[in-house]
Image: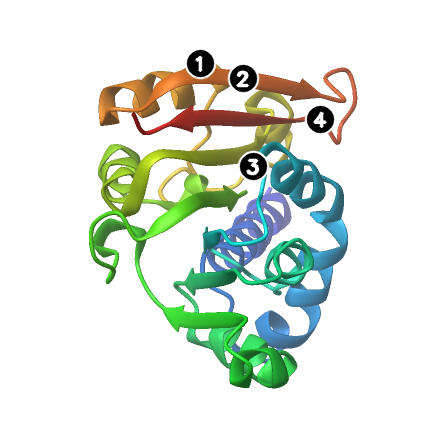
């Protein structure tokens, strides 16, 4: 019996470590291994999210929680005279992306900063588009986060919030104090409460483990 208890404790410790790293990557595990896994594992959902933003060449775009930087790179490719800014809660990811995109940063195409969605350090109505992929699970106050995003979004601007299906994510059994699960309806209702309009839920690969949703909202 003791062996089983110890095994359960080890499993809980591993799950807690993984959830903590997904929330805020640190050390070699976060900056090297996890960043690459995030870029690879999120490639499809990031591509789909960016397509839904209906980007124009001149747009100023904000990504909340850029992780390994794949979303920044893909967004930059859509912009000619525009710019993509990213914030992340992990200083390791900020340092990594600054190293990887130093040339684009010097050119003024990309700007990355350490930041918190609950207190965005930008003026009102700064961005034409905002998106976030697989990040809201870790926000301590999702409604406040959406309210901050709406504040920095221009009138007529779009926000895209993408996440995996909650029913599938439950299988990972990650600790609830770090990792919150949301249904598409949860997200749309919180966005509506924050003041977004014309909210649309787009489902992809619904019957597969890789299923995800892209929830779009507009600031009128």
Q: Say whether disc 4 or disc 3 marks the residue closer to the N-terminus.
A: 3
How much space separates mark 3 and mark 1, taking CA atoms? 20 Å
Mark 2 and mark 4 lie on one chain; the one further toward the N terminus is: 2
Total numbered badges shown on the rendered structure: 4
Q: Label 4, label 1: how many angstroms apart (C-alpha)?
A: 15 Å
User: Is residue 215 depicted above or below 74 in this figure?
Assistant: above
Question: Quick one: SS at disc 2?
Answer: strand
User: Mark 2 touching mark 3, by CB under 8 A?
Assistant: no
- The N terminus: image quadrant: top right
Measure the C-alpha gap from mark 1 to mark 2. Answer: 8 Å
Kindly report the distance in space between the C-alpha atoms of the residues bearing marks 2 and 3: 13 Å
Does residue 98 appear to the left or right of 148 in the view shown? right
* Residue at point 41%, 23% (across, down): 187
Q: CA distance from mark 4 to mark 3?
A: 19 Å
Q: Which residue is mark 2?
A: 201
Work out whether residue 209 can be spotted. Answer: yes
Residue position marked by numbered label 4 in the rendering: 211
Q: Few, some or many C-alpha atoms within 10 Å of disc 3 (few <14, some 14-19, many ≥20)?
A: some
Q: Is residue 178 among the parts visible in the rendering?
A: no
Q: Secondary structure at mark 1?
A: helix
In the foreground, 143 or 111: 111
Q: Are marks 1 and 2 in contact (CB under 8 Å)?
A: yes
Decide: few, some or many residues near mark 4? Use Cα within 10 Å; few <14, some 14-19, many ≥20. Answer: some
Indicate which label's residue lies in the foreground, 2 or 3: 3
Q: Which residue does the numbered mark 3 point to in the structure image?
A: 53
């Amino acid at each position: 019996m003791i062996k089983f208890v110890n095994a359960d404790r080890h499993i809980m410790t591993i799950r807690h470590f993984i959830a903590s790293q997904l929330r805020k990557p640190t050390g070699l595990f976060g900056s090297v291994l996890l960043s690459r896994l995030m870029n690879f594992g999120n490639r499809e959902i990031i591509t789909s999210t960016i397509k839904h933003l209906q980007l124009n060449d001149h747009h100023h775009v904000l990504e909340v929680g850029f992780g390994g930087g794949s979303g920044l790179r893909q967004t930059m490719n859509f912009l000619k005279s525009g710019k993509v800014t990213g914030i992340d809660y992990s200083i390791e990811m900020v340092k990594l992306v600054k190293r990887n995109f130093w040339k684009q940063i010097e050119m003024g195409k990309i700007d990355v900063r350490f930041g918190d969605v609950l207190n965005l350090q930008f003026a009102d109505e700064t961005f034409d588009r905002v998106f976030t992929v697989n990040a809201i699970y870790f926000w301590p106050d999702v409604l406040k986060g959406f309210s901050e995003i709406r504040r920095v979004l221009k009138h007529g601007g779009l926000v895209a919030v993408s996440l995996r299906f909650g029913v599938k994510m439950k299988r990972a059994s990650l600790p609830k104090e770090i990792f919150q699960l949301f249904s598409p309806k949860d997200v749309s209702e919180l966005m509506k409460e924050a003041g977004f309009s014309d909210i649309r839920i787009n489902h992809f690969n619904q019957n597969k483990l890789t299923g995800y949703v892209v929830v779009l909202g507009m600031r009128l």
